[in-house]
């Protein structure tokens, strides 16, 4: 549904291009100045106070180092974080930063892609609060007696709603392929005439609850369970129980071919309204004094439920929420976040009382998932912490550096990287990226700055034969584990 619209959307053609995955029609530079050229200068300004319920404050009043935030925005304007469409920051429940780029503004709804899954989790929590869904340990096959003659239903797989929420169903599923690959299960499911039958015919390959395997079909199935238990589809349910109470009137849900709501990746929201979701989560389900979803559900859905997770985009997984952890300025920072293709994010950092919103170009932006994480770990979070001393770059013998030279592969996504040496310098060359110098801070730990992404940390490790066999790359809250193959 799109409600509350009284005039044609300024960038409707562009939004339709994004929705249907055609090349987007964005500006060529992040922002134009008054003369039509590329804007490079930036001075912080308060977000506009408009006719909504956001309380506005400033970076300084809320204890945020404005110099780091100004530097971030200047770097975006300089093209160092390409394809970034918006950055918003909320501290202590107040909107303190709101910036848009590439022709977008606060009135434009933005495609959330898989960040939709986290909103779907909220809807499941509300259905529990309203006693429409009994509990998350209900067997999924019980909801679908009309899907007999499928493996899942006929064999009564012991998969529960909890397993759908935590992506631990145990069924055979592969989304680690290009979208054009016919073996990519999510797009294969969507191409089929009956997407649920496609899903229910998947074989069981692991005990439910034992292993995380990212599966957008499970998120889509949650939407159908909402419809069958509440009598409302996800569009109707979200309007009544989530969006109306939050004062969100401008949004859209995409649908599958059969008319069912795409709860795995079909929601469009304005960034300010994405921030309302984050503010509510940070307040344990309350918004402006009203309990929208129970505190128990916020706690349960944001903690780790995946017993085993190996994924480059997060170190843990709750109920459709990613989890991340890293050390910044000597402090361990934990966050959970909604994350969508190309760089659509709602970050919640409870210890710092902040939520941060990022929207980005969807198509032809394969590294967009990492840039917002880097903006968080290098600029936004450090702006809230006491300064830490700069790490000291040391000098290593050329023979030590030579040990790291070779070819490495992140096998899960078939990402390759080369490590090379020239005299006393060492470089990393990830697939399709520019060569980046790595600076040693210990014998096995290095730091660098990938163009178009930001800072990275690289650690090498040895096997029992004292040979380098492994390289770990940290980007933002993500870890990529590479094996040395040559």
Image (cartoon, grey):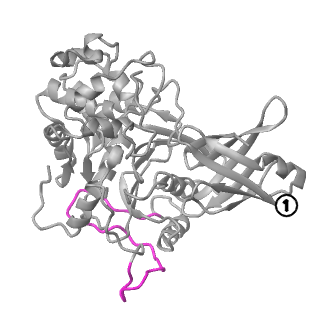
Q: Is residue 54 inside the magenta stretch?
A: yes
Determine the residue positioned at 23% across, 28% down: 196
Task: Establish if 104 lies above or below 270.
Answer: below
Residue 320 percent across, percent down from the top left: 37, 35
Secondary structure predominantly adopted by residues drawn in magenta: loop
| Residue to which mark 1 is pinned | 424
Residue 402 percent across, percent down from the top left: 84, 51
Residue 474 percent across, percent down from the top left: 62, 47
Seen in the image, is 416 located left or right of residue 302? right
Residue 221 visible? The answer is yes
Return the residue nearer the eye: 240 or 148.
148
Return the residue nearer the eye: 486 or 480.
486
| Few, some or many residues within 10 Å of mark 1 (<14, 14–19, 20+) | few
Q: Which residues are magenta?
A: 32-59
Residue 282, quarter of the rendered image: top left
Residue at the limit of the structure toward the bottom, as seen here: 35
Residue 44, quarter of the rendered image: bottom left
Return the residue nearer the eye: 406 or 30.
406
């Amino acid at each position: 549904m799109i409600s509350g619209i009284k005039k044609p959307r300024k960038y409707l053609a562009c939004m339709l291009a994004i929705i249907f995955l055609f090349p987007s029609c964005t500006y060529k530079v992040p922002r134009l100045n008054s003369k039509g050229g590329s804007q490079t200068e930036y001075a912080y300004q308060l977000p506009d106070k408009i006719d909504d319920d956001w309380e506005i404050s400033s970076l300084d009043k809320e204890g945020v180092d404005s110099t780091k935030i100004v530097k971030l925005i200047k770097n975006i304007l300089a093209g160092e974080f390409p394809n970034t469409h918006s950055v918003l920051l909320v501290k202590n429940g107040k909107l303190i930063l709101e910036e848009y780029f590439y022709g977008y503004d606060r009135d434009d709804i933005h495609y959330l892609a898989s960040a939709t899954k986290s909103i779907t989790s909220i809807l499941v929590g509300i259905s529990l609060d309203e006693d429409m869904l009994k509990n998350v340990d209900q067997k999924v096959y019980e909801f679908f007696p009309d899907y007999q003659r499928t493996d899942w239903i006929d064999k009564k797989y012991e998969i529960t709603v909890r397993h759908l929420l935590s992506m631990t169903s145990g069924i055979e599923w592969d989304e680690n392929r290009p979208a054009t690959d016919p073996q990519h299960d999510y797009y294969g499911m969507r191409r089929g005439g009956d997407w649920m039958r496609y899903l229910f015919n998947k074989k069981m390959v692991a005990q439910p609850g034992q292993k995380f395997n990212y599966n957008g079909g499970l998120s889509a199935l949650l939407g159908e369970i909402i419809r069958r238990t509440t009598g409302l589809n996800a569009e109707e349910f979200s309007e009544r129980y989530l969006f109306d109470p939050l004062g969100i009137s401008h949004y859209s849900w995409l649908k599958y071919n059969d008319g069912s709501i795409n709860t795995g990746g079909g929601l469009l929201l304005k960034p300010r309204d994405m921030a309302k979701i984050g503010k509510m989560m940070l307040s344990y389900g309350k918004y402006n004094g009203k309990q929208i979803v129970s505190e128990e559900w916020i706690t349960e859905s944001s903690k780790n439920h995946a017993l085993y997770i190996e994924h480059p985009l997060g170190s843990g997984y709750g109920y459709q929420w990613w989890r991340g952890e890293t050390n910044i300025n000597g402090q361990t920072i934990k966050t959970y976040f909604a994350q969508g293709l190309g760089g659509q994010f709602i970050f919640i950092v409870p210890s710092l009382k902040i939520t941060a919103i990022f929207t980005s170009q969807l198509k032809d932006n394969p590294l967009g998932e990492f840039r917002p994480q880097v903006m968080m770990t290098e600029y936004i979070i450090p702006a809230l912490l006491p300064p830490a001393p700069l790490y000291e770059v040391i000098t290593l013998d050329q023979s030590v550096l030579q040990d790291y030279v070779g070819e490495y592969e992140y096998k899960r996504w078939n990402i390759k990287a080369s490590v090379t040496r020239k005299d006393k310098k060492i470089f990393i060359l990830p697939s399709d990226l520019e060569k980046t110098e790595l600076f040693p801070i210990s014998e096995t730990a290095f730091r660098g700055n990938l163009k178009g992404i930001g800072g990275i940390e690289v650690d090498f490790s040895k096997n029992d034969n004292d040979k380098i066999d492994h390289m770990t790359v940290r980007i933002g809250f993500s870890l990529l584990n590479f094996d040395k193959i040559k």
